[in-house]
């Protein structure tokens, strides 16, 4: 007996966090299986009436059969495939779209099984079809079109007794190779077992074809061709190929200019490639967009990252003031002091620059307990802005902080 099989155990594609629909589908399958098998005597539901039988043409059972399984191995195998491929597709298709495609491909896969049985093995038309394998196969078709650049990690087992081979291991394959290997296994096993066998390979292949057709209709290959530049850039970075990473990430950002995370990755790649000017430009784009949409947390994080790599990185006066103020509200006092000082440093000729020194001084004295530095900043404010209308107030604040420091 010769045997070869594999199961996927992971993909190198960003996943939805959290993948609510994927988990909900897995939970539903487990609950239905427990009620239909171990706890079947506790309910009056005839669960197997919801299995799909080709001889009974109705509209409901091709969908309900998806959530029924013949045994724990059948259930766990499908749950594993769903856990591996589901979250990535849920992220790009959206929760509702992913749910509809899962049920839709499973439904049409059941009908594909019915067509095969009615034409090639009508004696098996009353046999029940259960399981999510057809829907899972549809996900494979969608995954192949959306993530052709992805890599699938598989656990495999090969048994060839005449050659004294009995090996198992883990390998990483391109998604195209992994899916084609799966198709080959389905075709071989279908030829061996025949259309009336215990496993519906017609549903598997029908689900795959349905997924491919739906994926083409949704334009998934176009999205994949765009995203592959992002993936290539990330892989170049993993290998330390910063200039190649910059080229790939630039291609992606030109097509998807509003992808904030990709711009941040491009900024980091440019910094590694020692293009400080280009890196700061990308960081500034992210900060400007985040501030325009009042996503101040994102803006502050991007600003802090940019400032650590470029000591002269700064924004317009208004933006610099907003960043410094929000950093202070977040309790990130040291970063707020730096931002306030940069407000004065890069906008020295503007009347608002004095406020940068005052706020930095106040934080240093009252929160960071660096009194001497804070009072020195007050003195600097008095020197740099001798004709400022707030001179009297500056003197008053300086004296008050000095008294507070002495009391402490």
Image (cartoon, grey):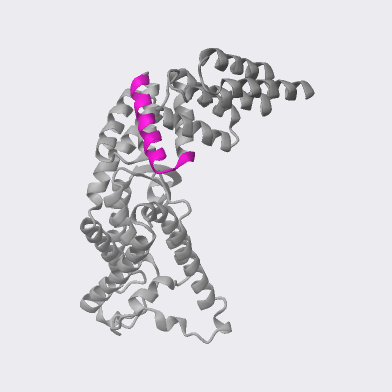
Frontmost residue, 176 versus 372: 372
280 magenta-colored: yes
In the rendered structure, the answer to whether residue 199 lies left or right of residue 300 reads left
Residue 321 position, x and y percent, is 47, 31
Q: Residue at x 62, y 27 (%)?
A: 363
In the rendered structure, the answer to whether residue 352 lies left or right of residue 148 reads right
User: Farthest residue in the top direction?
Assistant: 383
In the rendered structure, the answer to whether residue 99 lies left or right of residue 309 reads left
Residue 203 sits in quarter: bottom left
Residue 369 position, x and y percent, is 69, 24
Question: Which span is picked out in magenta?
Answer: 275-297
Residue 215 position, x and y percent, is 25, 57
- Residue 155 appears in the figure: no
User: Farthest residue in the right direction?
Assistant: 407
Q: Residue at x 60, y 21 (%)?
A: 392
Depicted 378 relative to depicted 359: above or below: above
Depicted 42 relative to depicted 178: above or below: below
Q: Residue at x 22, y 48 (%)?
A: 222
Residue 9 position, x and y percent, is 44, 50
- The quadrant of the picture occupied by the C terminus is top right
- Residue 289 appears in the figure: yes
| Total marks placed | 0
Q: Residue at x 45, y 33 (%)?
A: 302
Magenta-colored segment: predominant secondary structure: helix
- The quadrant of the picture occupied by the N terminus is bottom left
Frontmost residue, 120 versus 1: 120
308 magenta-colored: no
Frontmost residue, 288 versus 168: 288
Depicted 16 relative to depicted 350: above or below: below
């Amino acid at each position: 007996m010769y045997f070869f099989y594999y199961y996927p155990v992971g993909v190198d594609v960003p996943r939805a966090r959290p993948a609510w629909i994927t988990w909900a589908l897995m939970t539903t399958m487990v609950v239905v299986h427990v009620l239909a098998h171990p706890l079947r005597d506790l309910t009056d539901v005839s669960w197997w009436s919801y299995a799909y039988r080709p001889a009974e043409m109705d509209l409901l059972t091709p969908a309900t059969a998806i959530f029924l399984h013949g045994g724990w191995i059948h259930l766990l195998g499908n749950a594993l495939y769903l856990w591996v491929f589901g979250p990535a597709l849920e992220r790009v298709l959206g929760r509702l779209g992913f749910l509809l495609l899962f049920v839709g491909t499973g439904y049409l896969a059941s009908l594909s099984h019915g067509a095969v049985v009615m034409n090639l093995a009508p004696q098996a038309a009353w046999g029940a079809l259960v399981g999510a394998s057809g829907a899972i196969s549809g996900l494979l078709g969608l995954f192949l079109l959306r993530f052709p650049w992805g890599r699938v990690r598989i656990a495999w087992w090969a048994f060839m007794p005449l050659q004294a081979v009995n090996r198992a291991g883990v390998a990483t394959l391109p998604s195209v190779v992994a899916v084609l290997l799966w198709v080959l296994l389905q075709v071989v096993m279908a030829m061996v077992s025949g259309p009336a066998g215990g496993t519906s390979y017609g549903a598997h292949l029908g689900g795959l074809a349905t997924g491919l057709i739906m994926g083409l209709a949704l334009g998934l290959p176009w999205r994949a061709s765009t995203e592959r530049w992002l993936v290539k850039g990330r892989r170049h970075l993993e290998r330390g190929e910063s200039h190649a990473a910059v080229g790939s990430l630039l291609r992606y950002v030109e097509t998807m200019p509003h992808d904030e995370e990709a711009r941040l990755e491009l900024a980091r790649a440019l910094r590694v490639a020692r293009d400080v000017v280009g890196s700061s430009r990308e960081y500034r784009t992210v900060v400007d967009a985040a501030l325009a949409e009042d996503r101040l947390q994102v803006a502050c994080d991007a600003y802090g990252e940019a400032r650590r790599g470029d000591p002269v990185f700064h924004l317009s006066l208004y933006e610099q003031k907003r960043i410094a103020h929000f950093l202070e509200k977040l309790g990130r006092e040291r970063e707020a002091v730096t931002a306030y000082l940069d407000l004065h440093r890069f906008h020295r000729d503007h009347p608002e620059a004095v406020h940068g020194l005052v706020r930095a001084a106040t934080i240093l004295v009252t929160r960071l307990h660096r009194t001497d530095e804070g009072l020195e900043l007050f003195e600097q404010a008095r020197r740099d802005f001798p004709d400022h209308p707030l001179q009297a107030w500056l003197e008053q604040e300086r004296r008050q902080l000095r008294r507070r420091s002495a009391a402490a």
